[in-house]
């Protein structure tokens, strides 16, 4: 099946889809959950809470690697899967705003006001070590 | 935030969404990809190819555990995350049909004809050891 071109990946990831982020826990088992993301400068910008969420614990106690999957639910199916080692870059308000506003500005504003009060809220940067894309529409 | 009731989980998973299936590879790194699924008898029925896809290799060489995430892309956000040890149950044509027809009968028929010719095509059964659900709509 066909891959996407880099500009097609950019266009695909610019839609307000969810990413499914997989980590490995301290027992070596996979864990996956849906997350918001922002795709900018060929990098995924994610957000989590260092204490209240298991993603940060997994990256400390399990493997430092993460894998991330974004797919269109409608045909023609398109998908992007990336892997890399996320880097925690602190509570950056501008990035938190840009991540959350992708999913609706009004809701994003409310979310942001709440998130800025969470002491352990952070942004994570995932620069893909690998990125694979599929476009099943190109096969048809 | 609120969980879904069991019948709400059934209703949510009966829609033709994609699941994102995470495994751990032989190096202990997570891998995730979008997959079709069928939710029946409180069990996820998935399909893969034992040789041509990495999911089976991961379950042999990495951890036997898998984790699976299904989410609504639109608000109110709902999601189900399950974990378990997938069991390979062979090339069951009726199950392959029921899985693929969920995503469109005409396309499913074409897919099924092709899949039945693949020597390593199998169905995998994932009976959740854990299943967690979220319904953000209930919080509003």
Image: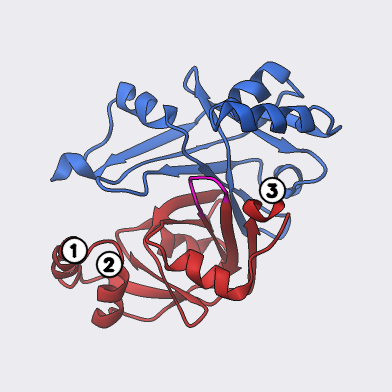
Chain colours: A red, B blue
Q: Is residue A40 left or right of residue B133?
A: right
Give the residues in magenta.
Answer: A71-77
Residue shown at 66%/58% (left/top)?
B28
Along the viewing direction, whichever of B18 and A120 lies nearer the viewer: B18
Q: What residue is shown at x 72% (from left), y 19% (from top)? A: B93
* Label 2 element class: helix
Q: Are marks 2 and 3 on the same chain?
A: yes
Specify whether disc 3 shares its chain with disc 1.
yes
What chain is tagged by disc 3? A
- Give the chain of mark 1: A
**Horizontal and vertical percent for residue A96?**
28, 74
Q: Nearer the viewer, residue A108 or A85?
A: A108
Labelled disc at residue A140: 3
Q: Which of the two discs, 2 and 3, sits closer to the camera?
A: 3
* Secondary structure predominantly adopted by residues drawn in magenta: loop
Which mark sits nearer the N-terminus, 2 or 3? 2
Q: Which residue is mark 2?
A: A100
Q: Nearer the viewer, residue A43 or B60?
A: A43
Q: Chain of mark 2?
A: A
| Left or right: A101, with A85 as reference point | left
User: Callout 1: few (<14), some (14-19), or many (20+) C-alpha neighbours within 10 Å?
Assistant: some
Instruction: Residue A74: say if magenta.
Output: yes
Residue A67 in the image, given as x and y percentages of width and height: 56, 61
Q: Which mark is residue B24?
A: none
């Amino acid at each position: 099946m066909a891959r996407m071109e880099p500009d097609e990946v950019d266009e695909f990831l610019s839609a307000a889809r969810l990413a499914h982020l997989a980590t490995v826990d301290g027992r070596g088992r996979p864990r996956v959950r849906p997350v918001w993301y922002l795709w900018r400068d060929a990098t995924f910008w994610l957000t989590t809470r260092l204490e209240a969420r298991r993603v940060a614990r997994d990256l400390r106690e399990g493997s430092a690697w993460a894998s991330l999957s974004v797919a269109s639910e409608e045909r023609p199916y398109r998908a992007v899967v990336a892997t890399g080692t996320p880097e925690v870059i602190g509570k950056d308000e501008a990035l938190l705003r840009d991540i959350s506003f992708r999913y609706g500005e009004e809701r994003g504003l409310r979310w942001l006001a709440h998130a800025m009060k969470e002491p352990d809220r952070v942004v994570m940067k995932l620069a893909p070590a690998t990125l694979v894309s599929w476009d099943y529409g190109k096969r048809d």
